Amino acid sequence: MTRITDKDRIDSLIKHFWKNGFLTLSRKHGTYLPNPNPIGDYEVDAVGKLNKKYVLGLTLEKEDIENPNILRKIKFLASQKNKFSLQKVTLFLGCPDELRSDVESLLSQLDENLRNNIKIVSTSLNND
C-alpha cells in the first residue's frame, strides 16, 4: 500500500475545487502558487475563488480528528465571510474515505448554519 503524502491530499482537495469551478489562489506544497495566509490563528491548506465566492480547503487525518481543538478550528473557519461582500465562505474538508463517518460525527456537534458552509470531500487516491 502506498503512503499518501500531505501533497497528495492537497492535490486531491484542489481537484475538488476545480470540479466545483473554483480557481486555486494559494495552496500548501504547490510549485507555482504561494502558501495560504493564516485565517485568524489557523492555517488552511488551500484557498480558492469563483467570481466573488471564496472557499477554504482543509485536509484532515486521524490525528487531526482526535485533536480536541479541531472542532474550534472548523467552527472558526466555517464561520468566515468575505471581507467586502460579507458572503459566507465555504469550507472544503478533505478526509480519507475511511474517516468520513468520524468527520460527519464531529460536524454533528456544530449548529446547522455552520454545517451548511462545510463540504466534506474525499482525499483518497481512488476518488477520481
Image (spheres, grey):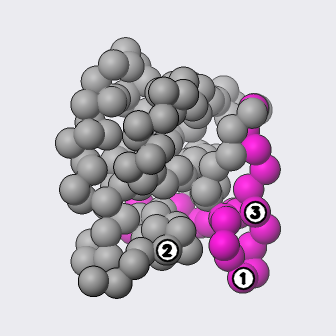
| Residue pointed to by mark 3 | 35
37 sits to left or right of 92: right
Task: For residue 120, say whether it is visible.
Answer: yes
Dot 1 or dot 2, earlier in sequence: 2
In the image, what residue type sits under mark 1?
Thr
Instruction: Give how far across and how far down residue 112 sits, in percent.
Output: 33, 19
* For residue 59, above or below residue 116: below
Depicted 18 relative to depicted 92: above or below: below
| Residue 3 falls left or right of residue 14 | left
Magenta span: helix, strand or loop, mainly?
A: loop
| Residue 19 disc label | none
**Residue holding disc 2:** 5
Q: Nearer the viewer, residue 115 or 61?
A: 61
Q: Look at 52% across and 50% down and name the residue there.
A: 58
Q: What residue sits right under mark 1 in the picture?
A: 31
**Neighbour tally class for label 1: few under 14, some 14-19, many 20 plus, Cα within 10 Å:** few
| Mark 2 secondary-structure assignment | loop
Q: Residues within 10 Å of mark 2 (few under 14, many from 20)?
A: few
Q: Label 1's element?
A: loop
Badge 3: how crowded within 10 Å, few (<14), some, or many (20+)?
A: some
Image quadrant in which you'd find residue 35? bottom right
The amino acid sitting under disc 3 is: Asn
Q: Is residue 35 above or below residue 4?
A: above
In this rendering, the count of numbered labels is: 3
Q: Which residues are magenta?
A: 18-40
* Marks 1/2: CA–CA distance: 15 Å
Q: 54 left or right of 3?
A: right
Instruction: Report the side of 123 relative to 30 (left or right).
Output: left
